[in-house]
């Protein structure tokens, strides 16, 4: 008989053998992009805090003020007594930024995707998903019970083929994609995809977790397109925590009634909501700040002769998990933290370094990092 501990030990040993075991490492964040890990000071090119708003004094003050006025926790689901007054202000700001009628906030981006999709789609329906969509889109799509059709990454012709073959048999159809791909940094062709979805009577949902705050002056990758379901997170450029859906009022009301990860969970703590409001105010009024992470990513790409970045995320594909880990170690020894990303987060054979650029990175540090990558990683590639 295998004991539970033996089962866990065997599983971990298998991960270790494939260089796929992960370990938590306590990491203290200082101001800007600086971190401390194992007594070493590192400049992080791995944080999704693209605008460094998690340490912005106005955002921290807003969090403290919200906790003083409304308490440390929400105390209940929003539909019971947890809908503290800050939520309304946060949802209004999100709707204004995204130019939608309404917005609804969730406990996290993961919770948003696992709540929204099953609230709208069921067994009789069909969901068309980009093959590189984020794990929580897959989780939501699978939970819904709808038929899943996977199109090749950003391949509109393949999506059109699948819609032509499978749309008719389904009651409702949804096309779902990341707006900015979290591990590749490229953008979905939102305008063309929306037209295609509309032509096949399908609803488009974009996940703009990595777009809000940093693409299109902070308005995100769907800006300028009438995307009916615009999901995202407050945990990256907004520097705080929580997920959201921006949509029409009636769709948001349905989500408030039917999304299980909204109904059956406690509201976000007031401090988190207060921080998000302050951060969104900064995003709405500072386009130069919002443009900086992409400019920094492009500086890095230009220095290495890579194609221009489309977002603050730049991947450097290295193939095996072992190679990605070795490259991470080389950079860490030189004072830079750049996370190695391995399967199953990315497809087999595409382990990589994922560089994430933020507003406060100093040009000199970006240039030093590029030089190091050129001299120590690309030469051995
Ligand atoms: C594309 C995408 N969607 C959703 C999420 C989940 O967001 P959160 O961290 O708020 O749960 C992430 C973050 O990891 C993401 O990269």
Image: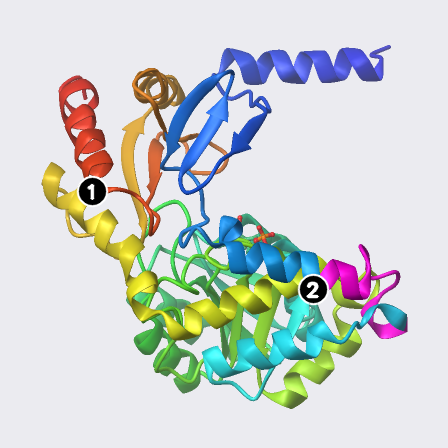
Image position of 18 with respect to 127: above or below: above
Q: Earlier in the sequence, mark 2 or mark 1?
A: 2
Q: Pointer 2: what residue?
A: 115
Identify the mark at residue 317; answer none if there is no mark.
none
Q: Residue at x 52, y 11 (%)?
A: 17
Residue 268 seen anywhere in this rendered image of the structure:
no
Q: Work out whether residue 104 or residue 146 is closer to the camera in this orientation and state it.
A: 104
Q: Residue at x 79, y 72 (%)?
A: 84
Q: Residue at x 16, y 52 (%)?
A: 308
Q: Residue at x 30, y 53 (%)?
A: 293
Q: Are marks 2 and 1 in contact (CB under 8 Å)?
A: no
Q: Pointer 1: what residue?
A: 363
Tell me the element at label 1: helix
Marks 2/1: CA–CA distance: 41 Å
Quarter location, residue 368: top left
Residue 185, image x, y percentages: 33, 51
Q: Quadrant of the N terminus?
A: top right
Residue 313, image x, y percentages: 33, 48
Colour scheme in use: rainbow
Eye-nearest disc, 2 or 1: 1
Residue 244, image x, y percentages: 60, 68
Quarter location, residue 379: top left
Q: Quadrant of the C terminus?
A: top left
Q: Work out whether residue 204 or residue 231 is closer to the camera in this orientation and state it.
A: 231
Image position of 358 with respect to 223: above or below: above
Residue 72 drawn in magenta: yes
- Please give left or right for residue 76 compared with residue 37 in the image: right
How many neighbours does mark 1 have within 10 angstroms: few (below 14), some (14-19), or many (20 or more)?
Answer: few
Image position of 115 with respect to 1: above or below: below
**Segment tinted magenta in the rendering:** 66-80
Residue 374, image x, y percentages: 14, 26
């Amino acid at each position: 008989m295998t004991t539970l501990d033996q089962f866990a030990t065997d599983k971990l040993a298998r991960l270790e053998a494939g260089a796929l075991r992960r370990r938590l490492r306590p990491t203290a964040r200082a101001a800007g992009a600086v971190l401390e890990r194992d007594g070493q000071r590192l400049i992080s090119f791995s944080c999704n805090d693209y605008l460094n708003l998690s340490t912005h004094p106005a955002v921290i003050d807003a969090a403290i003020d919200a906790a003083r006025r409304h308490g440390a926790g929400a105390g209940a689901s929003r539909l019971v007594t947890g809908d503290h007054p800050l939520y309304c202000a946060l949802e209004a700001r999100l709707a204004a930024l995204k130019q939608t009628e309404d917005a609804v906030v969730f406990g996290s981006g993961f919770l948003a995707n696992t709540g929204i999709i099953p609230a709208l789609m069921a067994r009789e329906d069909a969901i068309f998903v980009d093959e590189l969509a984020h794990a929580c889109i897959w989780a939501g799509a699978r939970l819904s019970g709808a038929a899943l059709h996977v199109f090749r990454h950003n391949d509109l012709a393949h999506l059109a083929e699948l819609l032509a073959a499978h749309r008719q048999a389904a009651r409702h159809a949804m096309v779902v994609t990341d707006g900015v791909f979290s591990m590749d940094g490229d953008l979905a062709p939102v305008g063309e995809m929306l037209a295609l979805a509309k032509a096949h009577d399908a609803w488009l949902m974009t996940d703009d977790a990595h777009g809000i705050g940093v693409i299109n002056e902070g308005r995100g990758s769907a800006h300028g397109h009438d995307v009916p379901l615009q999901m995202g997170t407050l945990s990256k450029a907004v520097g705080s925590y929580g997920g959201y859906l921006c949509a029409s009022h009636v769709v948001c009301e349905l989500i408030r009634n039917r999304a299980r990860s909204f109904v059956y969970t406690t509201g976000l703590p007031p401090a988190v909501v207060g921080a998000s409001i302050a951060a969104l105010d900064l995003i709405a009024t500072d386009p130069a700040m919002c443009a900086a992470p992409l400019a920094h990513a492009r500086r890095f790409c230009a220095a290495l002769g890579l194609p221009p970045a489309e977002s603050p995320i730049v991947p450097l594909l290295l193939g095996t998990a072992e190679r990605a880990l070795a490259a991470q170690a080389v950079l860490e020894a030189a004072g830079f933290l750049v996370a190695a990303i391995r399967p199953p987060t990315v497809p087999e054979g595409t382990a990589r370094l994922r560089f994430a650029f933020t507003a406060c990175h100093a040009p000199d540090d970006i240039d030093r990092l590029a030089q190091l990558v050129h001299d120590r990683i690309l030469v051995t590639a």
